[in-house]
Image: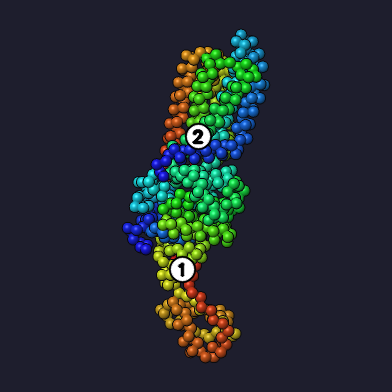
């Protein structure tokens, strides 16, 4: 039976999908809030474009891309919370005691969350296209590539957050701060060019900055321009994966895992 | 059955030591359990029972010592050992927002069981553990007893060769307990080695389990219940309708005689053999005899004796 990783992964993916579907509120909330804010902020960005003589469509692009980045970061909290639940429900030890390897467990839990984040972005961009005429000049495949790369980043960051947080309260507070900071630095709320100088200098350190850059390239540029931001997002994703793997390796050490058990 | 035999032991722990900071959880813990055997592991809180289960499941690495499952060291052959183990930990470890059936399916899948195979096995266990009517209810809506049975079912799904049940009947009602104990007996009859941790010693009689008493991180008594009970003195409780005769036991005889009001309690390996000559020697007292009750030693007596020693 130990030689059936496919069966184990499928079982874990199916189960995680069920758990996500049983508690859809947060994901729906972040989707609805994203849509509302796209509609609410778009006139502001369009007006701003007139002042800066930017192309007419740039306002819609900024609103859609900004909200897609910001609310995917909030959705990250949902994924991280599901991982944390495994510890508060004591099921984490059951998973560790099973034949499933650590990578299998994480992959099984992460895949449905990855799909959920992708779906969230697809809806935000899809509605923006249908309602506000958003049209990626680099093509929809280019936009999809951005969404894939960014979702991977979000996923690895969420995995790290979940393994570090000990309680849902810690996760919620840290997740909110991280999401807002990354979104603001990335220019999701206020375009980077209008941020205070010191924030502009540190903005490239935020993965959100590169996500917004990638989305702007896909929405207003050409596929060739996507190379650099996607490469940087890839580096962020790899760094996130490395951190998650490092934390995972430490978590596999039973003594540390015991110390990281939730405070009850 | 060779309970202590190295060849037939499905589970064998030897000289396990585990410290958490300054606390010593396991201090030379030895235990062998043969295939088909149910070993009742008893001991006070902190005696090392749960740590032993966690070490065996590969969740805690011992500082020294070794656990072998089917001859394979747990720490060195985790990937090969884990499919052979079933673990129902002390705390409930289920997905509360999923249904009972969904919980069973995910654990079946984690042990590599395909959907059809899992469906069949879930049906069997649902019947055995009286879970059939609640399979499609969410775990958070189940009673404590139903959750306990479900947890045990998740550990038994893949027909483990070693089943670790850590206090599976805590808070369970008699019906729940009976169903669970019957299922455990069936698992053992199927050839699994079962380690059954409990504070409810009469359950071990129902399970016809062998006994292992843990104290301060080591097993202080191990063997057949009857053999271990034979080492514990029984009691004769004699009630009179007036104060009992003033008698004392000869020093070093292993007999203890206690007077309380109109009651005389004799504790001895064979209390009846002490009582008969005593009454013969005090014919006046015998005339005032109201009742005699011979109390054979219980597992509780054995446990108290071992732990207090």
B223 or B108, nearer to the observer: B108
In front here: B164 or A47? Answer: B164
Q: Quadrant of residue B164?
A: bottom left
Residue A194: x %, y % from top left: 59, 16
Residue B101 location in percent, x, y? 55, 46
Q: CA distance from mark 1 to mark 2?
A: 51 Å
Letter of the chain that mark 2 sits on in the rendering? A
Question: Looking at the image, do the residues carrying marks 1 and 2 touch, with CB atoms under 8 Å apart?
Answer: no
Left or right, B40 with reference to B284: left
Residue B238 vs residue B82, the one in the foreground: B82
* Position in image of residue B158 (x %, y %): 45, 49
Residue A46, picture quadrant: top right
Tell me, for residue B197, which label it has, or none.
Answer: none
Q: Residue furthest bottom?
A: B283
Pointer 1 chain: B
Q: Judge whether residue B31 can be spotted in this image.
A: no
* Residue at the outermost left position: B7
Dot 1 falls on a residue whose secondary structure is helix
Q: Residue at x 35, y 63 (%)?
A: B2
Residue for badge 1: B302
Which circle marks residue A110 in the picture? 2
Rendered image quadrant of residue B262: bottom right
Quadrant containing the N terminus of chain A is: top left
């Amino acid at each position: 039976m130990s030689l059936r990783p496919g069966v184990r992964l499928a079982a874990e993916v199916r189960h995680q999908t069920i758990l996500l579907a049983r508690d859809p509120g947060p994901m729906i909330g972040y989707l609805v809030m994203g849509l509302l804010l796209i509609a609410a902020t778009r006139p502001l960005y369009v007006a701003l474009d007139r002042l800066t003589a930017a192309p007419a469509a740039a306002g819609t692009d900024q609103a859609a891309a900004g909200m897609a980045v910001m609310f995917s970061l909030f959705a990250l909290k949902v994924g991280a919370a599901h991982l944390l639940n495994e510890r508060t429900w004591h099921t984490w030890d059951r998973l560790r005691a099973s034949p499933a390897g650590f990578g299998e467990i994480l992959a099984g839990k992460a895949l449905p969350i990855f799909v959920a984040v992708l779906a969230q972005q697809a809806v935000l961009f899809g509605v923006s296209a249908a309602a506000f005429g958003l049209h990626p000049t680099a093509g929809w495949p280019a936009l999809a590539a951005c969404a894939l790369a960014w979702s991977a980043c979000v996923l690895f960051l969420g995995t790290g957050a979940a393994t570090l947080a000990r309680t849902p309260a810690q996760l919620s507070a840290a997740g909110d701060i991280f999401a807002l900071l990354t979104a603001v630095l990335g220019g999701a709320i206020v375009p980077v060019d209008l941020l205070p100088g010191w924030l502009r200098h540190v903005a490239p350190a935020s993965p959100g900055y590169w996500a917004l850059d990638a989305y702007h390239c896909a929405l207003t540029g050409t596929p060739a321009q996507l190379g650099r931001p996607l490469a940087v997002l890839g580096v962020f994703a790899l760094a996130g994966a490395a951190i998650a793997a490092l934390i995972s390796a430490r978590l596999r050490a039973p003594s540390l895992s015991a110390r990281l058990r939730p405070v009850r | 059955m060779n309970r202590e035999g190295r060849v037939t032991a499905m589970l064998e722990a030897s000289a396990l030591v585990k410290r958490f900071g300054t606390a010593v959880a396991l201090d030379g813990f030895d235990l062998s359990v043969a295939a088909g055997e149910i070993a009742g592991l008893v001991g006070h809180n902190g005696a090392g029972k749960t740590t032993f289960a966690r070490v065996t499941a590969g969740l805690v690495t011992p500082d020294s010592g070794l656990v072998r499952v089917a001859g394979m060291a747990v720490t060195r052959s985790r990937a090969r050992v884990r499919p052979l183990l079933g673990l129902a930990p002390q705390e409930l470890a289920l997905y509360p927002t999923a249904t009972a059936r969904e919980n069973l399916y995910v654990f079946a899948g984690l042990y590599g069981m395909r959907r059809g195979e899992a469906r069949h096995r879930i049906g069997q266990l649902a019947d055995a553990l009286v879970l059939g009517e609640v399979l499609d209810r969410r775990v958070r809506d189940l009673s404590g007893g139903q959750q306990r049975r479900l947890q045990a079912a998740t550990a038994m799904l893949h027909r483990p060769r070693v089943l670790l049940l850590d206090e599976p009947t805590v808070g369970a009602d008699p019906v729940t307990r009976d169903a669970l104990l019957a299922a455990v007996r069936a698992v053992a009859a199927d050839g699994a080695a079962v380690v059954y941790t409990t504070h409810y010693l009469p359950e071990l009689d129902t399970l016809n389990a062998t006994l292992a008493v843990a104290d301060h991180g080591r097993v202080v008594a191990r063997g057949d219940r009857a053999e271990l009970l034979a080492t514990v003195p029984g009691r004769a409780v004699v009630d009179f309708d007036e104060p009992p005769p003033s008698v004392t036991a000869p020093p070093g005889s292993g007999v203890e005689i206690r007077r309380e009001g109109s009651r005389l309690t004799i504790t001895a390996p064979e209390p009846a053999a002490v009582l008969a000559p005593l009454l013969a020697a005090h014919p006046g007292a015998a005339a005032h005899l109201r009742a005699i009750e011979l109390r054979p030693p219980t597992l509780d007596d054995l446990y108290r004796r071992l732990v207090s020693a």
